[in-house]
Amino acid sequence: MRRVDGRAPNEIRPLVLEPSIHPYAEGSCLITVGNTRVLITATVEDKVPPFLKGTGSGWVTAEYSMLPRAGKQRSQREVARGAPTGRTMEIQRLIGRAVRGVVDLSALGERTITLDCDVLQADGGTRTACITGGFVAFVDACRWMIEQGYMNRMPFQERVAAISVGVVRTDELLDLCYEEDVQAQVDMNVVMTDRGRYVEVQGTAEGTPFSRERLNRLLDLARTGLEQVFKIQASALEPLLR
């Protein structure tokens, strides 16, 4: 099939990561993936959840929100509804889990880093963009902590990023945009480290069930895309890791 934006089935959308873009936050990143844009800020606070008090361990968490005109039609702000939707809760928990999966939390001390992910423009793949860009914002905040004398090293050995894959009609596609995502018979988000280890895989048959062989092909397709993502992410992180 011909993709709506003319890409090959195994081609990712143009990806740009701009770290340290926010003047007030301890860490930040603006990520652009095709027509999806997310501003992520990282805030460092001297507190942890109650279950971590006295353990010496820190925490990484996330909050996710879409601006009312992130899409083609205005959506109501969740604050006006009185509570976040189930989708919002699912996404922000995923972002937090993904970043925590590669972090030595004990290195943070009893501090929390909160990743606020605000979707400025949505065209599919917002949760995967939040993970890829969220890790950059996290590293930016860690650099700030080192400069302040709160840590003496970066608290990770592997980097994390995420990408979507899916089946549209009969075609296996990488990095789905919105128009492809809403048609997908299989929809999958793959979170992986730069060493090729999985942090999380979310895969759903929206139409008919899929085979183990198709699952393997989709995972291979995701890995191919993530290898490209990690190269771009490494370039964005280089000035933060000097």
Image: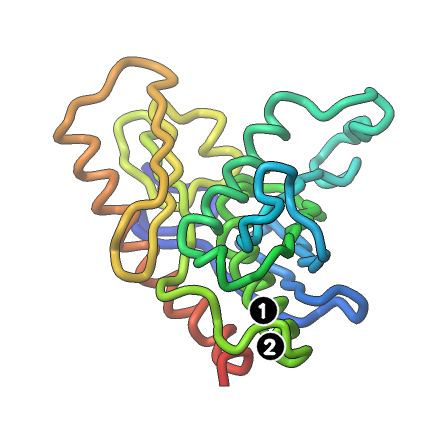
> Can the viewer see residue 18?
no
Outermost residue, top side: 208
Total labels: the figure holds 2
Q: Looking at the image, is 162 positioned above or below residue 136?
A: above
User: Mark 2 is on which residue type?
Assistant: Ile
User: Mark 1 is on which residue type?
Assistant: Cys
Mark 2 and mark 1: span between their CA atoms? Answer: 6 Å
Question: Percent from the top left, x then y, of residue 11?
Answer: 35, 54
Question: Which numbered circle lies on residue 142?
Answer: 1
The residue sitting at 34% across, 28% down in the picture is 203
Report crowding for label 1: few under 14, some 14 to 19, many 20 or more residues within 10 A (C-alpha).
Answer: many
Q: Looking at the image, is 122 positioned above or below residue 57?
A: above
Residues marked 2 and 1 touching at CB (< 8 Å): yes
27 vs 210, nearest the viewer: 27
Quadrant including the N terminus:
top left
> Can the viewer see residue 146?
yes
Question: Percent from the top left, x then y, of residue 26?
Answer: 71, 67
Outermost residue, bottom side: 242
Question: Percent from the top left, x then y, of residue 70?
Answer: 72, 41
Outermost residue, left side: 213
33 vs 204, nearest the viewer: 204
160 vs 61, nearest the viewer: 61
218 vs 107, nearest the viewer: 107
Q: Which residue is mark 2?
A: 146
The residue sitting at 46% across, 76% down in the picture is 235
